[in-house]
Amino acid sequence: MDLFKTYKLWPIEPVKGLGCRVWDSKGIEYLDLYGGHAVISVGHCHPHYVKALTEQAGKLGFYSNAVENSLQTTLAAKLGEMCGYPDYNLFLVNSGAEANENAMKLASFVTGRSKILACGKAFHGRTSGAVAVTDNPKIQAPFNRTGNVEFIPLNDTAALEAKLATKEFAAVIIEGIQGVAGIWEPTAEFLAAARAACDATGSLLIMDEVQSGYGRTGRFYAHQACGVKADIISMAKGMGNGFPIGGIIINPSIAATYGMLGTTFGGNHLACTAAIAVLDIMKAENLMQNAAEQGKFLMESLKGNKAVKQLRGRGLMIGIELKDGYETLRDRLLFEKHIFTGGAGASVIRLLPPLCITAAECGQFVASFNELTK
């Protein structure tokens, strides 16, 4: 049996990691400025994280959600304390796509409505409902296309208000920062208008913080910089530092009923242990502040580079739009300078490093980038 060929693979196999560094099967060391799609939040193989998971694996790895699991309540309490939504309720799943699926399903249950409003260029995941609200025909099979989803341009307040005024929509779903599209931010005015329009029309505001959340932008969730509160917030990626876990937090005004939502693996003992360890490390090492500081350093250091058309983003979620040579530069950074970066859109290098990245490591990237683009 062979693998189903779904990814273009670089001829590199990372086999070991520590902090913001990984080593491949040939022993070559790489600086990781991508974190495996923003997943590695507190660094590869952090000793507290490794110890916590190892100890839990020796006790109990899994039992179903038909019994009590105090790790879930511990995680909810710690998350509420750190994220700024202490009175919200937590539902745990396994991935960002599942989080968005459940957020939209819950909004539909609560409102009795069947339609969802999404933004152009959005990416919300690869499961059926998440694909339906993802504005990318390349991943939308005929099965995923539905008249229950409509799209508006990001930051088009007039279009948003006109759609929600029909009172047909259960929710509007907006990314805290659009990552796959190329690091595009919703404006504070747009989010404020979305909040007001939802309040006026009975729709719910869902913020997708799967990539932009968990301290990546210097706030726990990116939308918090705009002073707007969401009804439901989805998260995943950095939540488990590599262990699969996701979730939604839900306005306490939304009442749960038995059977409304469900999951087999969501919130299992190992996943919760990983997520608790992540929050403990983030707090102890002040990683949100570090994300803000190192992101500012990167943005300021890259200004003026003649190869850069535009810099976008906040904290450690940065898009470097290039004038040309995007794929060539990414390859040269990887194979000549041994630095992992990501891509977004047609010409954007995307930086999503672990939140523990140091000033020296940021300086290493800037020096390599400048050398290759001089």
Image (cartoon, grey):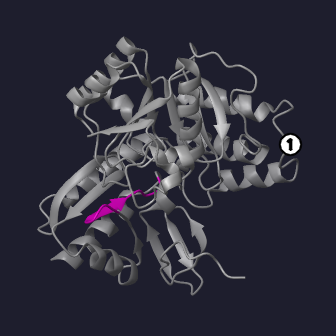
Q: Which of these two is toward me, 31 or 334?
A: 334
Q: Is residue 372 visible?
A: yes
| Rendered residue at 24%/35% (across/down) | 155
Q: Quadrant of residue 136?
A: bottom left
Q: Is residue 200 above or below residue 92?
A: above
- Which residues are the magenta region? 344-354
Name the amino acid type tagged 1.
Tyr
- Who is closer to the viewer here, 213 or 143? 143
**Res. 227 visible in picture:** no
The picture places residue 50, in percent across and down from the top left corner, at 70, 56
Q: Is residue 115 above or below residue 178?
A: above
Residue 187: % across, % down: 25, 34
Is 205 rendered above or below residue 51? Answer: above
Inspect the magenta stretch and tell me whether residue 345 lies in it: yes
Query: Label 1 neighbourhood size at 10 Å, few (<14), some (14-19), many (20+)?
Result: some
Compare residues 78 and 91 and report the one nearer the observer: 91
State the residue at coordinates (67%, 82%): 2
Question: Relative to the observer, which residue lies in front, 182 or 38?
Answer: 182
Q: Label 1 belongs to which residue?
A: 63
Q: Is residue 359 left or right of residue 26?
A: left
> Residue at (58%, 27%) from the top-left corner?
106
Mark 1 element type: loop
Picture coordinates of residue 115, whole percent (x, y): 45, 30
The image quarter containing residue 217 is top left
- 169 left or right, relative to 120: right
